[in-house]
Image: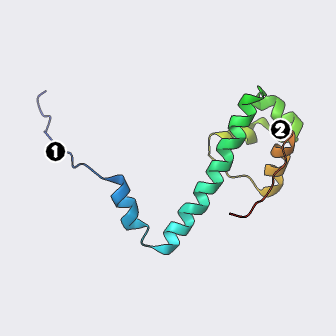
Amino acid sequence: MKGDVDMPFKKIDVKELLEKEFEDVALKSNYDQIKKEYELIEQIVKIRKQKKISQVDLAKKARVSQQAISRLEREKHIPKIDTLMKIVDGLGLKLTLTER
């Protein structure tokens, strides 16, 4: 096509880039925390789907809005602990803590 410019693309090694960035201890710590939050959200979504519970039904059981469930599942919002506990209860689950 006329006017197109061939732009060479530089291959990026994401793993190497992250390793370099994670030399910053604060950044690594923040990343690890966020990763844990999103892993928990993924588990909640997986269990809701396995139980074949709609977002609407879960919202009713958890006494939260369907929009709150949707935002959580689209990973647009990390809920406050009280909302998270309502959702866990709505799924008939128990949140347990164990040592690593």
| Crowd band around label 2 with a 10 angstrom C-alpha radius: few (<14), some (14–19), many (20+) | some
Q: CA distance from mark 1 to mark 2?
A: 50 Å
Q: Secondary structure at mark 1?
A: loop
Tally the numbered discs. 2
Q: What's the mark number on residue 20?
A: none
31 relative to 8, above or below: below
Quadrant holding the N terminus: top left
Tell me where residue 52 sits by quadrant: top right
Instruction: Identify the residue at horizontal 71%, vertical 30% (top origin).
Output: 49
Tell whether 65 sits left or right of 10: right
| Label located before the other in sequence (1 or 2) | 1
Instruction: Identify the residue at horizontal 35%, vertical 60% (top origin).
Output: 17
Position of residue 13 measured from the top left corner of the image (x, y, whole percent): 31, 53
Residue occupied by mark 2: 91
Tell me where residue 31 sits by quadrant: bottom right
Quadrant holding the C terminus: bottom right
